[in-house]
Amino acid sequence: MYMPDFEYHAPKTLADACVLLDELGERAIVLGGGSDILHKLKNGHLTPEHVVSLKHMTHLTEIRHEEGRGIVIGALVTPHGVYTSKILQERYLSLPMASHEMGNPQVRNRGTVGGNICNASPLADLPPLLIALNASVKVVQYAGERIVPLEDFICGPGKTLIKRDEILTEVIIPDQPATGSTYIKFGLRKAGALAVVGVAVAVTVKDNVLADVRIVMGAVAPVPMRAKDAEALLRGQTITDVLLEQAADSAAAECKPITDLRGSAEYRRELIRVLTRRALRKAIDEGHV
Amino acid sequence: MINQTITDKDGVKRYLITLNVNGDARTVLVKGNAILANVLRDELNLTGTKKGCELGDCGSCTVLLEGKPVDSCMVLAIEADGLEITTIEGVAVNSKLDAIQEAMINFAAVQCGYCTPGMVLSAKALLTRNPHPTEPEVREAISGNLCRCTGYVHIVEAVLAASEGRLSPGEHEYLREEGVSI
């Protein structure tokens, strides 16, 4: 399969990479695991003159907890790394479970969390759950760094707020009172399937009352979409089956699905209704799963 | 570590990299855009690694990179510089087939054979980290390897049998009812 020519760079440090990107600007792209980038190079969607690989930045393959910041996931952590992370299994088991539903074993060994975000596919599996968990991303460049809420960072299909001279280095999940979270993906097969629809929720339950809730729907809008009407309906209310049904109806009404080869808009809307109800019930009853 | 680059008259750079393939350090000169699957096949003559979809869906180009299965069609050769790679040619030791290979032959788990190298490597990675997997674990481990002949039942049987050190089927093993897996 055709691959365009480019010059390859593998800077030793993040600082070196930033200097390089500052110099190359629009002519360069940043390479993480390559699962998405190589697709785009092969099908001609990307024709960079330079490719800057992050492969020497081994410190970006770690997951750790930092006092006052929360859980910090390095951009180069693979889905397999998320799946096997002790710290995530203990605090937010929903993330390892969601990452295990991505692609297939080969892709999970090679893809990266940072790439899953920067590729900004509307049907990506990790962003909905990360947004439900109120995650932010850190992007660095030569002139400095900034932290952006993930919800704002992804701004269109394949579009994020990242500039060509910036590198996404960390995903930060703040410490929070959420008592449960989950991501339910509906794919057409058990493995190697893209989401027809995905629903992520994070709930804070106190004495059978939903103190707080975040619902994020994947693959039914140009970006992972908050079901804000459904959230407003639930917030502060006592949990009943009827209430969860109403919230599910509301989420289905709010989403903006399209018809494509994986499913019709009507089918997706119905899936949102069913999966939202299931996800809420699961996170309320079982915690972070 | 890339320690040498050569630029030709058209300004295209080539990089001298070292791939540790099946225990041998192989030094090759590659362009930045060279795909690992192509370098293994075309430069190193390791044609056991097959190419199918070339987009990371089918798994026929599976190799082990630092012991983990990856699609070699979705890795730049230069990204594998200095890393350990195992291809299907490196699974047999001293011309003695691995238990998985032996079992796949004896359990008739090879039909057209195109997916087999990738299947063997995915199974090898599984049995290395989990020597006694369950059937669902085997199916999960080979879920990134597509068999167009749909011969999954025998492949799963062979991997499970290999994990039990049972390299051939028993006498009545193929008299099972249709559609019933072990």
Image (cartoon, coloured by chain):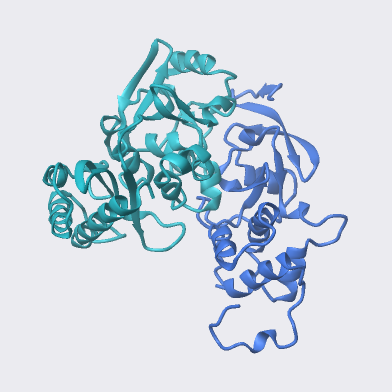
Chain colours: A cyan, B blue
Q: Residue at x 59, y 22 (%)?
A: B11
Q: Nearer the viewer, residue A120 or A48?
A: A120
Residue furthest front in the image: A207
Is residue B132 in view?
Answer: yes
Quarter of the image for residue A276 reads bottom left
Q: Nearer the viewer, residue B68 or B49?
A: B68
Q: Residue at x 53, y 32 (%)?
A: A5
Q: Is residue A23 above or below residue B107?
A: above
Picture coordinates of residue A30, whole percent (x, y)? 47, 28
Residue furthest top in the image: A143
Q: Is residue B136 above or below residue A169?
A: below
Question: How many numbered callouts?
Answer: 0
- Does residue B74 appear left or right of residue A232 in this picture? right
Picture coordinates of residue A171, whole percent (x, y)? 40, 30
Q: Residue at x 59, y 74 (%)?
A: B153
Q: Is residue A222 above or below residue B1?
A: below
Picture coordinates of residue B172, whole percent (x, y)? 71, 88
- Does residue A241 appear left or right of residue B46 in this picture? left
Q: Residue at x 13, y 46 (%)?
A: A237
Picture coordinates of residue B93, whole percent (x, y)? 84, 55
